[in-house]
């Protein structure tokens, strides 16, 4: 979906949603570092949004600006952050990952979103979140709900972790569960 070139929108928003520890960030990292994604998006930015910054649009924008410019901007006003960010992102095709968003406030999201709409056609914002509601607020159309492993795959993962890839030296009497 991120690589779909048919979209004429300047910026599209996507979310990966699932319970904590399921692998949302790991999946986003795999996407972010994929060769096709690197080739498609000349500008790729990653920002971790902690719980204490979830409602602070200026702090999120400052984090994005710092990831693009590699400079600190703590003393900047929101207008100055917006202006600098617009100058660095304006008209460029980018992928921004906002990792671990918790904010369910639609008004705060819309405020943040308007500052991200400066990208060139085909730009993408990927959000990871535990909250189904946050994913709906971001954009319900492009939502990927991450599910846990099946019982069979969970058991296979346990076997590989406990006994190695080939299960060599496996003691089958350990498998009995009473």
Image: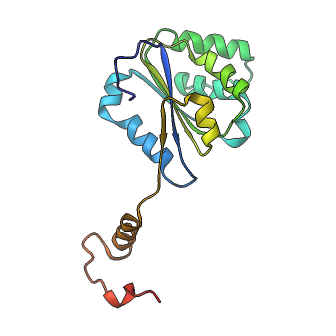
**In the rendered image of this protein, does residue 178 appear above or below residue 2?**
below
The image shows residue 5, relative to residue 99, as above or below, that is above
* Quadrant in the picture for residue 27: top left
Say how the picture is coloured. Answer: rainbow
User: Is 145 left or right of 54, judged from the image as shown?
Assistant: left
| Place of residue 170 in the rendered image (x, y in percent of width and height, measured from the top left) | 30, 83
Which residue is found at the position 45% from the left and 40% from the top? Answer: 28
Percent position of residue 5, x then y: 34, 18
Q: Where is residue 110 in the image (x, y as percent from the top left)?
A: 67, 21
Using the image, determine if residue 134 lies above or below residue 4. below
- Counting the numbered discs, the total is 0
Identify the residue shown where x is 59% and y is 15%. 85
In the displayed structure, does residue 169 sit left or right of residue 126? Answer: left
Position of residue 150 measured from the top left corner of the image (x, y, whole percent)? 41, 62
As drawn, 55 above or below 169: above
Q: Outermost residue toward the front?
A: 141
Does residue 31 appear to the left or right of 71 in the view shown? left
Q: Of residues 113 and 98, which is closer to you in this image?
A: 113
Question: Which quadrant of the structure image shows residue 64?
Answer: top right
Occupied quadrant, residue 1: top left
Whether residue 15 can be seen here: yes
Work out whether residue 49 can be spotted. no
């Amino acid at each position: 979906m991120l690589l779909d070139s048919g979209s004429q929108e300047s910026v599209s928003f996507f979310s990966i949603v699932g319970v904590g520890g399921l692998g949302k960030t790991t999946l986003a990292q795999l996407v972010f570092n994929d060769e096709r994604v690197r080739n498609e998006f000349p500008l790729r930015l990653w920002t971790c949004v902690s719980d204490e910054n979830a409602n602070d649009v200026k702090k999120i924008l400052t984090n994005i600006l710092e990831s693009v410019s590699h400079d600190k901007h703590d003393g900047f006003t929101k207008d100055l952050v917006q202006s600098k960010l617009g100058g660095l992102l304006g008209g460029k095709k980018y992928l921004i990952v906002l990792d671990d968003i918790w904010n369910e406030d639609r008004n705060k999201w819309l405020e943040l979103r308007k500052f991200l709409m400066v990208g060139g056609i085909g730009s993408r914002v990927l959000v990871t979140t535990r909250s189904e509601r946050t994913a709906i607020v971001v954009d319900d159309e492009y939502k990927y709900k991450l599910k846990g492993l099946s019982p069979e795959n969970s058991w296979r993962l346990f076997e590989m972790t406990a006994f190695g890839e080939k299960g060599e030296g496996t003691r089958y009497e350990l498998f009995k569960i009473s």
